[in-house]
Image (cartoon, rainbow, N blue to C red):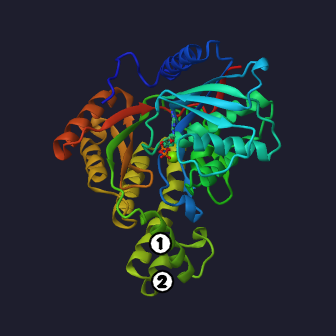
């Protein structure tokens, strides 16, 4: 578990800066050591967590994420003019490996390593007609890799922000997020929705984003209360199962919607689902009930945030978890245990609400917790989870943070 310094209250904006400053120092030092000159550009892009609206991004639904105060940073500098090299030299502190991307030949998907995300972004800019200069870069991150908090999108968006600086080709923000999403689809082979890259680009301190996955519009939802933060608990398990669960859920949602005779889940009510029950298989019925109720819950949660009705927010988070566990069947023993512990601590102990977040079958839970009780809540969750599962979880907290930005140019 992360140790909390008593002065590092997450309601204090300094925490945001001290974490990112520390990382900036690490990447610039490494850059100087490796390349023998200072980095001239430093950029940052955050990971994200989704508060509610799960498995409905591909069902015309809504998501309600926030950008985390955890970032991927890149320190970089163009190759000196005399070097005449048309390549990118990259070093990742987390991977502890150096890689090269050649710029004098077409960049095609196929590489399976971490540079595929970089290549996807570079290829996107090349398609837009940008000329990419050769450069050196060191990247570092304080996001868990592969933990469901979208370090991959943070890496893509940081790289796109860097390329904008190096080429002078600035994109509209939604264009930039979509370019990064295409990189993830084509070069990493992950058919993600728009939430990850949109959150990393558009994140604003003290705000959630209600993203309409049908229209791709973002509504800003203030998260002003300085007394409450988001606690992320990584279960540190990942059940791969057959690997086809995600595709199967999508197929079940699709066939269910077809049987309901509708083209969008937005036009379906819970009554419609009940009335069509006989025509649906049991899994189709349950998936439909999750999708329709989760769309409703996400809209209600945004409203409850606006009116700071924490009781309502908490109830919606717990019902979202129940629905994902029982109707969508994407939770697992460890996630259920984490949510049960959080719920047993309850509002008297500082927990407003809790649920699994992300695709499921492992990964993280997200909870809303009163700052004053953050340390005791984290300690209790860690102790009880470890005693029940034998696994040590990883906890950290965050406030909604700023999206991708340039730290030095
Ligand atoms: P998530 O996005 O949930 O963290 P993914 O599997 O989608 O999980 O993305 C993780 C991958 O992103 C890593 O395996 C690596 O290839 C790449 N990545 C993320 N951060 C870094 C980093 N700091 N250095 C190198 N690669 C990174
Ligand atoms: Mg990812």
Q: Is mark 1 within 8 Å of ligand 2?
A: no
| Residue under pointer 2 | 276
The tag earlier along the polypeptide, 1 or 2, is: 2
Q: Could you tell me residue 312's position as x and y percent?
A: 42, 49
- Tell me the SS state at disc 1: helix
Q: In this rendering, is residue 382 above or below 181?
A: above
Outermost bottom residue:
278
The residue at the point 74 percent across, 31 percent down is 86
> For this rendering, which residue is in front, 300 or 367?
367
**The N terminus: image quadrant:** top left
Q: Could you tell me residue 320's position as x and y percent?
A: 41, 57
Q: In this rendering, is residue 213 above or below 228?
A: below
Q: Could you tell me residue 275's position as x and y percent?
A: 47, 83
Residue 265 relative to residue 381: left or right: right
- Tell me the SS state at disc 2: loop
Residue 89 falls in image quadrant: top right
Closer to the eye: label 1 or 2: 1
The residue at the point 38 percent across, 32 percent down is 396
Outermost right residue:
129
The residue at the point 47 percent across, 56 percent down is 54
Residue 370 falls in image quadrant: top left
Alpha carbons under labels 1 and 2: distance apart: 10 Å
Q: In this rendering, is residue 401 above or below 212?
A: above
Residue 219 relative to residue 66: left or right: right
Residue 43 falls in image quadrant: top right
Q: Would you say residue 329 is visible in this rendering? A: yes
Cβ–Cβ under 8 Å for marks 1 and 2:
yes
Outermost left residue:
387
| Residue under pointer 1 | 288
Q: Residues within 10 Å of mark 1 (few under 14, many from 20)?
A: many
Q: Would you say residue 212 is visible in this rendering? A: no
């Amino acid at each position: 578990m992360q140790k909390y310094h008593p002065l590092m209250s997450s309601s204090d904006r300094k925490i945001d800066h001290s974490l990112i400053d520390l990382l900036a120092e690490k990447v610039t030092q490494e850059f100087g050591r490796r390349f023998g000159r200072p980095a001239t550009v430093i950029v940052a892009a955050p990971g994200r967590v989704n508060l509610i609206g799960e498995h409905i991004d591909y069902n015309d639904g809504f998501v309600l994420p926030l950008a985390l105060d955890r970032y991927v940073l890149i320190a970089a500098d163009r190759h000196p003019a005399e070097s005449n090299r048309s390549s990118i030299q990259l070093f990742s502190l987390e991977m502890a490996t150096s890689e090269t991307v050649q710029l004098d030949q077409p960049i095609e998907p196929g590489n399976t390593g971490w540079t595929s995300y970089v290549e996807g972004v570079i290829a996107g800019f090349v398609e837009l007609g940008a000329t990419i200069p050769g450069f050196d870069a060191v990247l570092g991150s304080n996001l868990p890799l592969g933990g469901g908090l979208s370090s991959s999108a943070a890496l893509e968006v940081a790289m796109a922000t860097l390329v904008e600086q190096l080429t002078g080709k600035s994109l509209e923000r939604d264009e930039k997020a979509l370019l990064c999403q295409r990189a993830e689809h084509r070069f990493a082979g992950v058919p993600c929705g728009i939430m990850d890259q949109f959150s990393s680009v558009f994140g604003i301190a003290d705000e959630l984003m209600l993203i309409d996955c049908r229209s791709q519009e973002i509504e800003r939802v203030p998260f002003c209360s300085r007394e409450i933060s988001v606690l992320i608990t990584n279960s540190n398990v990942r059940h791969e199962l057959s690997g086809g669960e995600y595709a199967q859920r999508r197929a079940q949602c699709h066939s269910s919607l077809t049987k309901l005779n509708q083209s969008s889940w937005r036009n379906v009510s819970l009554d419609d689902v009940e009335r069509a029950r006989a025509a649906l298989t049991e899994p189709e019925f349950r998936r439909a009930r999750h999708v329709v109720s989760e769309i409703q819950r996400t809209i209600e949660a945004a409203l409850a945030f606006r009116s700071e009705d924490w009781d309502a927010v908490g109830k919606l988070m717990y019902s979202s978890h129940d629905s994902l566990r029982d109707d969508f069947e994407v939770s697992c023993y460890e996630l259920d245990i984490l949510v049960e512990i959080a719920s047993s601590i309850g509002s008297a102990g500082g927990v407003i609400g809790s649920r699994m977040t992300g695709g499921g079958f492992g990964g993280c839970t997200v909870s809303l917790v009163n700052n004053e009780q953050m340390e005791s809540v984290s300690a209790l969750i860690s102790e009880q989870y470890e005693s029940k599962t034998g696994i040590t979880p990883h906890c950290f907290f965050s406030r909604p943070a700023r999206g991708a930005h340039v730290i030095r140019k």
